[in-house]
Image: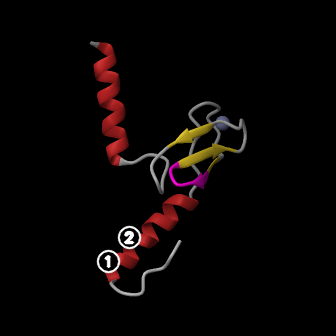
Amino acid sequence: MRTPKFGASNRKLVDKATKAKKAKYECPKCRKKMLERKGNALWLCKSCGSKYAGAAYSFTSESGEIAKRLISEYSES
Ligand SMILES: [Zn+2]
């Protein structure tokens, strides 16, 4: 990732994104914390090999959670 030269708030955003993308996330299929970021919003489980489309720098995002909730609400009715 490119590092911003100017602006404390920009650096803070990049720090947050870098930390989020390096963290390990739980695989929804095998429940192991083996998800790794492979590309922009592409997450791969090192244990079972499944691929997921997540948020750009973390596996889930606030808007992603909202979308997930809306989808389940619509499919119920
Ligand atoms: Zn898995």
Q: Secondary structure at mark 1?
A: helix
Q: Amino acid at mark 2?
A: Leu
Q: Amino acid at mark 1?
A: Ser
Q: Position of 29 compared to 9: left or right?
A: right
Residue linked to disc 1: 9
Please rate how many residues cluster around mark 1, counting C-alpha atoms within 10 Å: few if below 14, some from 14 to 19, many from 20: few
Marks 2 and 1, how far apart at CA: 6 Å
Q: Secondary structure at mark 2?
A: helix
Q: Percent position (x, y) of residue 5?
A: 42, 87
Instruction: Say which residue appears at 48% left-offset and 79% top-offset.
Output: 3
Q: Residue furthest top?
A: 77
Q: Percent position (x, y) of residue 63?
A: 32, 45
In this rendering, the answer to whether 77 lies above or below 62 is above
Q: Main secondary structure of the magenta part?
A: strand
Which mark identifies residue 20?
none
Instruction: Say which residue appears at 57% left-offset and 42% top-offset.
Output: 26
Instruction: Say which residue appears at 40% left-offset and 78% top-offset.
Output: 11
Q: Quadrant of the C terminus?
A: top left
Which mark identifies residue 13?
2
Please provide the residue range marked out in magenta: 37-41
Residue contact between numbered discs 2 and 1, judged by CB atoms under 8 Å: yes
Q: Percent position (x, y) of residue 27?
A: 59, 38
Q: Percent position (x, y) of residue 34?
A: 66, 46
